[in-house]
Image (cartoon, grey):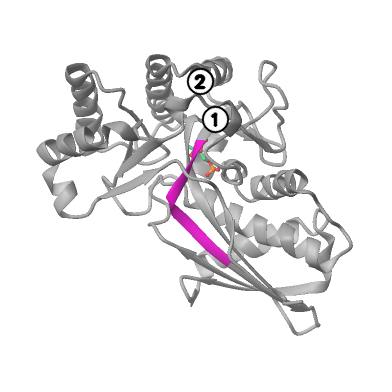
Amino acid sequence: MTNQIKWRSPSNIAIVKYWGKYGTQLPMNSSISFTLKNSFTETSILWQERTKDSAHEFFYNGMKADQFRKKIISFINSIEEELISLKQLSLQIDSVNNFPHSTGIASSASSMSALALCLVKMQEQTTSEKYDWCEFQTRASIVARLGSGSACRSVFPYCAQWGFHPQIPNSHQEYAIALESLLHNSFKEVADWIFIVNPNEKKVSSRAGHSLMENHPYREARISQAQQNCKLVYDALQQGDWELFIRVCEEEALSLHGLMMSSQPGYLLLEEDSIAIVKSIQQFRKESKIPVCFTIDAGPNIHILFPKTALDKVNDWAISQFPNYIKEGRIIKDEMGAGPVQLI
Ligand code: PMV
C-alpha cells in the first residue's frame, strides 16, 4: 500500500455568515454556504514512521513556506488525540492553491478541508479504523473545522450548513451537514463570479474579526439575526424562492461588514470598487428582473451569485459596467461544484 494521499478540495462562499466563535472553534451562530468548483486547493501527504530526527515538513506552491508552516504544524500537533496515527508518523505536506490566498476568497476553507480529508484518509489507511462514506465526511468535517471553521462546510458538495439550529434537522456545532438533496431545481446550478477588487492580503484577518465578536456591542442581536437568516435561506433553497434568498444573502453580506465597522476598534475592508459593484448589481437586477445578487466575505472582493441560465446577460452587464475587470482578468468565474475529489 502506498504511503501517499492527495485530495482536491474547493473553497466555499457563505450565504449566511459564520462570524464569531468560542471554545474549540465552535460557531456563535449557524451558517449556510455554497461549495465552489473552480477555486480549490490540492494537498498531498507523504508519510513515514516518525524517528527522533524527522519532523513534519510543509510546502506551499512547491516552496518551503514558513508563513503557513507554523500554523499547519501546530494544527497537526493539536489533533493528535483526534487522529492517533499522527503520533507515530512524520508528514511531508504539499499544498497548491489555484487562486490568491487571504483576499476574502476562503483559501483557508479549501486548504484546511483538503488537509483534513488527507489526514482522515491517512488515519484509515494506517490504523484499523474504517469509516463508511458518511462517517468519513463527518470526521473530515470535524478535523477541517478545527483547522478553520468555514472549512468544515467545504467537505460537502453544492451546499452545506454548519452549527446547531433548532429548526434544521441533524445540524450540529462540531461539523457541517449536506443540504444538496434539499435544493430546489432552481438552486442546482448557481454561478459565483468573484470580482477581485484587491488581490493583496487583507489588513485584518478573519481570526482577529472573530475575536472582536466576543465583546461586540451587537453580539446577541447578531446571533439571533443569523439564526433567523439561516432558517430563511434553508426555506428559500428548498422552495426555489430567489427573492427571499437575495434579500437575506445581501443583508448577511452588509451585516458582516457592518459588524466589522462597529467592532471595537472598528475597521473597514470594503473599497470604492466594492461599493460601485454592489450598487451596479442592484441596479442591474432592478432593470433586468434577473435574480442576481452579491455577497461578500471578509475582504473587499465581491461575489455575484445568479442562476447559470443568466450567464450571457450577466456577462453583458460585466462587459458594459466593468470592462477593466474583464480586460485585466480580475473576475474568477466560479460556480457551485460537486465537492472534494481524492486524486491519489
Ligand atoms: O473560517 P474562518 O475562520 O476563515 O472564517 C470565515 C468567515 C467568513 O468567511 C467571513 C464567513 C463564513 O462563514 O465563511
Label 1, on which residue?
A: 32
Label 2 neighbour load within 10 Å: few <14, some 14-19, many 20+? many
Image coordinates of residue 223 in percent, x first then y, are 58, 20
Check residue 14 for magenta coloring: no
Looking at marks 1 and 2 on the same chain, the residue that comes earlier in the sequence is marked by: 1
State whether residue 329 is above or below residue 279. below
Q: Is residue 41 magenta?
A: yes
Q: Are marks 1 and 2 in contact (CB under 8 Å)?
A: yes
Q: Quadrant of the N terminus?
A: bottom right
- Residue on which disc 2 sits: 233
- In this rendering, is residue 160 above or below 72? above
Say which quadrant the C terminus sits in. Answer: bottom right
Magenta segment range?
34-43
Mark 1 and mark 2: Cα distance apart in space: 8 Å
Residue 100: percent from the left, percent from the top? 38, 57
Counting the numbered discs, the total is 2
Front residue of this view, candidates 313 and 115: 313
Q: Is residue 112 left or right of residue 264?
A: right
Picture residue at 46% right of the left edge, 70% below the top? 61
Residue 163 position within the rendered picture, expressed as x and y whole percent measured from the top left? 66, 29
Whether residue 80 sits left or right of residue 313 in the image: it is right
